[in-house]
Amino acid sequence: MGYSFTRQRPVLSYIADFMCKELCLVIEVDGITHLDEEVQQKDKIKQQDLEKAGFRVLHFRDELVLNRIDLVAEEIEECIQEIVNGRVHPL
């Protein structure tokens, strides 16, 4: 689709797994440690902070990325189309 994503990108006081600055889109790939309640609470705060700053945040389980990358790519493409078509306004 022509957009560039940077891996392990600092954003606010966090590190985003992947970020496209142009789209204000953050993609997080969550492994088994994200099943822990404390980690989930930190993830929730991170997402709220990023959204308040104007970012759209997508989360994917690592198993889905490893086993069904086609579904992951499809969801990312749909999100990009929503942003580009103005249904979700990046800053």
Image: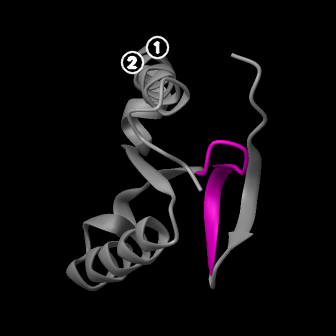
Dot 2 lies on which element? Answer: helix
Where is residue 47? Give x, y as percent: 39, 68
- The front one of 12 and 74 is 12
Where is residue 22? Give x, y as percent: 72, 44
Dot 1 lies on which element? Answer: helix
Residue 43's place in the image compared with 18, above or below, is below
Q: Residue at x 59, y 56 (%)?
A: 91
Instruction: Assess disc 2: are there few (<14), some (14-19) or many (≥20) residues with their C-alpha within 10 Å of its C-alpha.
Output: few
- The front one of 39 and 74 is 74
Q: Residue at x 42, y 21 (%)?
A: 78
Q: CA distance from mark 1 to mark 2?
A: 4 Å
Residue 32: image tag: none
Q: Is-magenta flag for residue 36?
A: no
Q: Write down the region rendered in magenta.
A: 14-24
Which residue in the protein does label 2 denote?
71
Residue 19's place in the image compared with 63, above or below, is below
Q: Amino acid at mark 1?
A: Asp
Residue 45's place in the image compared with 16, above or below, is below
Residue 48's place in the image compared with 54, above or below, is below
Q: Is-magenta flag for residue 16?
A: yes
Which residue in the protein does label 1 denote?
70
Left-right relation of 46 to 8: left
Residue with the most extreme left position: 37
Where is residue 21? Give x, y as percent: 72, 51
- The front one of 72 and 4 is 4
Which SS type dominates the magenta stretch? strand
Residue 34: image quadrant is bottom left
